[in-house]
Amino acid sequence: MTTSNASMIETAQQAINAARHCWVLGLKVESIAAANLTLSLPYSPQIIGNPENGVIHGGALTTLLDTTCGFSVAIALNIFMITPTLDLRIDYMTSAKPNLTVYATAEVYRITKHVVFCRGTAYQDDISKPIAYCVATFMRPPEPSNSHPQSKPEIPHEQ
């Protein structure tokens, strides 16, 4: 049984909204493809870090990247469960421009028995002009005992 992309987006959005801080920030699922996820963070006065120039607070960008990576893990594993962040490293390239939505895209690139590896990019108008890059690791949750294997993306697995 395959799940439609619209259904996956709806399920992912419900899961993201269940995390109150993500709902308050207004994180929105933009697209899902295999082990890739793109979320958006709309600009709002509540996330301004510097009132003098309107630049977004780094904590909002960290939440965006961590959430995007974490949910890309759930999508790659085809189970919507909490995937605790073990490590998150962010390299900030530039400040986000005021009054523009920020997007983050993430991909899972390796899955081992206990850890899942992911990388992400935050950007505004053009992904080739990133605001930040990140690499992250997440604890791999155990497979639910009542799950049935569904089509999963081809990602290097280590047993």
Image: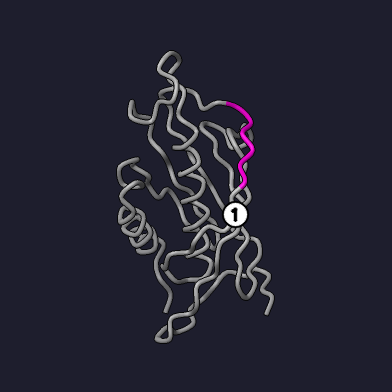
Quadrant where the C terminus lies? bottom right
Task: Indicate left or right for 128 with 44 as reference.
Answer: right
Q: Quadrant of residue 129?
A: top right
Q: Nearer the viewer, residue 158 or 126?
A: 158
The three-letter code of the residue at mark 1 reads: Asp
Task: Indicate left or right for 70 with 94 as reference.
Answer: left
Q: Nearer the viewer, residue 145 or 127?
A: 145
Instruction: Write down the region rendered in magenta.
Output: 89-94
Give the image location of residue 91, x and y in percent: 64, 38
Q: Nearer the viewer, residue 142 or 72?
A: 142
The colour scheme used to paint the residues is one colour
Quadrant where the N terminus lies? bottom left
Task: Indicate left or right for 123 with 1 as reference.
Answer: right
Q: Quadrant of residue 158?
A: bottom right
Question: How crowded is the residue under tag 1: few (<14 C-alpha within 10 Å), some, or many (20+)?
Answer: few
Give the image location of residue 106, x and y in percent: 56, 51
Question: In what element is the residue under mark 1?
Answer: strand
At x 43%, y 27%, the residue is 100
The residue at which mark 1 appears reads as 87
